[in-house]
Image (cartoon, grey):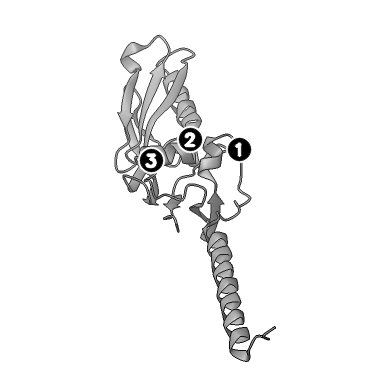
């Protein structure tokens, strides 16, 4: 029996080394393609400060059994509206409930007996969010109360075919400190992860697939 030469052994070892390197590259590549683990993120749906009114916001003021006093208003650049009977009402920085109270109290002061007032926000033009990356219509969107990440992506035209749907990054400004969350939007849509609620100023980025 002929014993293998040193050249034969070297050839076999070289082939084995190549196979091991290919396996390592494949494993590393697969690991790189996996989605990152989701962040711990808040589940609170509505923050009081997110509901305050500002310039350009559109809302309806209803006064029960007073059709002439019921109308839709768009706040001026100064954050005010002109309301029948009582004149200028400052709305900037106030919640709908605070505006209701002010209008009710001023109407009750010599104009109506026990007025019932409600304020219904139709559009927050003063509050924006941004959606970028692998969506069909990236850009700036208007914020709505109780808005979810799925609604935001939908308003941006939905994901592109190359979107990495479970690796969406949402950056939030918390009083000057930036907080980023990795959000599994695909899993949320399937009911396998808790919902993520958007706040004004949030920046949503949808990354490109790596494979």
| 65 over 179 or under it: above or below | above
Residue at figure coordinates x 47%, y 38% from the top left: 150
Q: Nearer the viewer, residue 194 or 101?
A: 194
Circle 1 crowding by C-alpha within 10 Å: few under 14, some 14–19, many from 20: few
Query: Residue 128 location, x and y as percent?
Result: 38, 45
Q: Which quadrant is home to the N terminus? A: bottom right
Between disc 2 and disc 1, the foreground one is: 1
| 146 over 27 or under it: above or below | above
Label whose residue precedes the other's in the sequence (2 or 3): 2
Query: Residue 100 location, x and y as percent?
Result: 46, 26
| Residue topped by disc 1 | 192
- Image quadrant assignment for residue 67: top left
Label whose residue precedes the other's in the sequence (2 or 1): 2
| Residue topped by disc 2 | 95
Cα–Cα gap, marks 2 and 3:
31 Å
Residue at far bottom of view: 6
Q: Name the secondary structure under disc 1.
A: loop
Cα–Cα gap, marks 2 and 1:
34 Å
Residue at figure coordinates x 32%, y 21% from the top left: 71
Circle 2 crowding by C-alpha within 10 Å: few under 14, some 14–19, many from 20: some
| Residue topped by disc 3 | 158
Query: Residue 93 location, x and y as percent?
Result: 44, 42
Q: Are marks 2 and 3 in contact (CB under 8 Å)?
A: no
* Observer able to see residue 54: no
Residue at figure coordinates x 37%, y 38% from the top left: 155
Residue at far top of view: 65
Between disc 2 and disc 3, the foreground one is: 3
């Amino acid at each position: 029996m002929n014993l293998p030469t040193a050249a034969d052994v070297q050839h076999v070892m070289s082939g084995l080394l190549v196979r091991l390197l290919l396996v390592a590259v494949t494993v590393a590549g697969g690991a790189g393609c996996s989605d990152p683990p989701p962040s711990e993120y808040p589940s609170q749906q509505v923050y009081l400060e997110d509901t305050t009114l500002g310039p350009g916001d559109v809302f309806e003021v209803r006064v029960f059994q007073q059709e002439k006093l019921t109308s839709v208003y768009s706040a001026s650049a100064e954050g005010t509206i002109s309301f029948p009977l009582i004149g200028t009402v400052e709305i900037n920085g106030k919640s709908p409930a605070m505006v209701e109270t002010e209008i009710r109290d001023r109407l009750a002061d010599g104009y109506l007996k026990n007025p019932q007032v409600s304020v219904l926000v139709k559009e927050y033009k003063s509050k924006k969010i941004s959606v970028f990356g692998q969506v069909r219509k990236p850009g700036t969107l208007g914020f709505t109360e109780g808005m979810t990440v799925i609604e935001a992506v939908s308003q941006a035209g939905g994901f592109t075919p190359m979107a990495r749907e479970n690796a969406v990054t949402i950056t939030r400004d918390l009083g000057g400190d930036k907080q980023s969350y990795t959000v599994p939007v695909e899993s949320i849509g399937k009911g396998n992860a808790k919902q993520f609620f958007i706040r004004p100023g949030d920046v949503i980025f949808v990354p490109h697939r790596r494979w």
